[in-house]
Image (spheres, grey):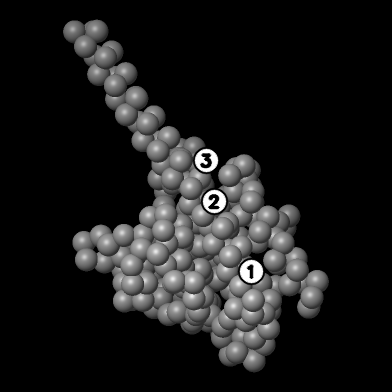
């Protein structure tokens, strides 16, 4: 009887460990793809995120479309990550999921990348909550594009979140009104451990994993470039 219990317990632990390893591998892939997405977007001549926004953005969320973006029960569900500005750079990524709302009508399939800029402290607090609805809990607008879009940017600055999509190589502002963003706790736990706190992640108190360094480097380079050119 004891032998049977030990076997069952061992098998159960193996299942748990394999699940955690799988989630961590997914986190690493999402992080790597997010870095690629951001770099490609910002390297697009005159069609990237305006420098004026990069100077003042609080947090950036990236949902890579071709990592895991699928139709779930008639709606859309995607997984990505968010990183926030801290006093010493950019935070380790917190993993997030987005679903529902008007996303399904706008992404048009599994190859669309989404980028969200969180522009003020209220938007940051929404990101730290378990779940929030874009447009209801935090105001949203389609983000302006172009290296310099000062006039358009001024008009958009009242929005707490600016959102973008990239499909078939075209990067543009897009409305995500009605979509729901929530913390991907299983992703955070797989990357950082069971008792991780998302406030500590985004405040910079959690060490940046090696897999996230290329992403933070890309963001840091473009934010630095924006400040220098301003």
Residue 133 image-quadrant placement: bottom left
Classed neighbour count for the residue bearing mark 3: other residues with Cα under 10 Å, few (<14), some (14–19), many (≥20): some
Count of numbered labels shown in the rendering: 3
Percent from the top left, x then y, of residue 44? 61, 73
Percent from the top left, x then y, of residue 69? 36, 59
The answer to which of marks 1 and 2 sits earlier in the sequence is 2
* Residue 120 in sight from this viewpoint: no
The answer to which of marks 2 and 3 sits earlier in the sequence is 2
**SS class, disc 2:** helix
Q: What is the CA distance from the residue labelled 3 to the residue labelled 1?
A: 31 Å
Q: Is residue 46 above or below residue 215?
A: below
Q: What is the CA distance from the residue labelled 2 to the residue labelled 3?
A: 17 Å
Q: 98 or 74, which lies in front?
A: 74
> Looking at the rendered structure, which numbered label has been put on residue 192?
3
Classed neighbour count for the residue bearing mark 2: other residues with Cα under 10 Å, few (<14), some (14–19), many (≥20): some
> Looking at the rendered structure, which numbered label has been put on residue 188?
none
Identity of the residue furthest to the left in this view:
1
Q: Which residue is mark 2?
A: 32
The quarter of the picture where the C terminus appears is bottom right
Instruction: Say if mark 2 contacts mark 3, CB within 8 Å.
Output: no
Instruction: Say if mark 3 contacts mark 1, CB within 8 Å.
Output: no
Q: Nearer the viewer, mark 2 or mark 3?
A: 2
Q: Is residue 107 above or below residue 15?
A: below
Left or right placement of residue 104 versus residue 130 in this view: left
Left or right placement of residue 49 versus residue 133 in this view: right
Q: Residue at x 32, y 18 (%)?
A: 10
Q: Which residue is mark 1?
A: 43
Classed neighbour count for the residue bearing mark 1: other residues with Cα under 10 Å, few (<14), some (14–19), many (≥20): few
Q: 4 or 121, which lies in front?
A: 4
């Amino acid at each position: 009887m004891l032998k049977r219990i030990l076997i069952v317990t061992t098998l159960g632990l193996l299942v748990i460990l394999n699940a955690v390893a799988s989630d961590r591998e997914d986190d690493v892939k999402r992080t790597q793809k997010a870095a690629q997405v951001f770099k490609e977007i910002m390297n697009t001549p005159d069609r990237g995120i305006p420098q004026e926004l990069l100077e003042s953005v609080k947090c950036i969320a990236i949902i890579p479309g071709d990592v895991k973006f699928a139709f779930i029960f008639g709606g859309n569900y995607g997984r990505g990550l968010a990183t926030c500005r801290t006093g010493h750079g950019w935070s380790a990524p917190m993993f997030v999921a987005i679903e529902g709302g008007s996303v399904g009508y706008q992404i048009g399939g599994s190859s669309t990348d989404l980028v969200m800029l969180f522009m003020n402290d209220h938007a940051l607090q929404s990101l730290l909550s378990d779940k929030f609805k874009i447009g209801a809990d935090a105001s949203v607008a389609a983000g302006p594009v172009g290296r310099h879009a000062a006039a358009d940017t001024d008009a958009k600055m009242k929005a707490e979140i600016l959102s973008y999509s990239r499909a078939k190589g075209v990067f543009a502002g897009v409305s995500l009104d009605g979509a729901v963003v929530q913390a991907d706790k299983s992703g955070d736990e797989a990357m950082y451990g069971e008792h991780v706190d998302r406030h500590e992640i985004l405040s910079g108190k959690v060490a940046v994993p090696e897999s996230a360094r290329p992403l933070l480097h890309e963001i840091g380079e473009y934010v630095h470039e924006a400040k220098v050119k301003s």
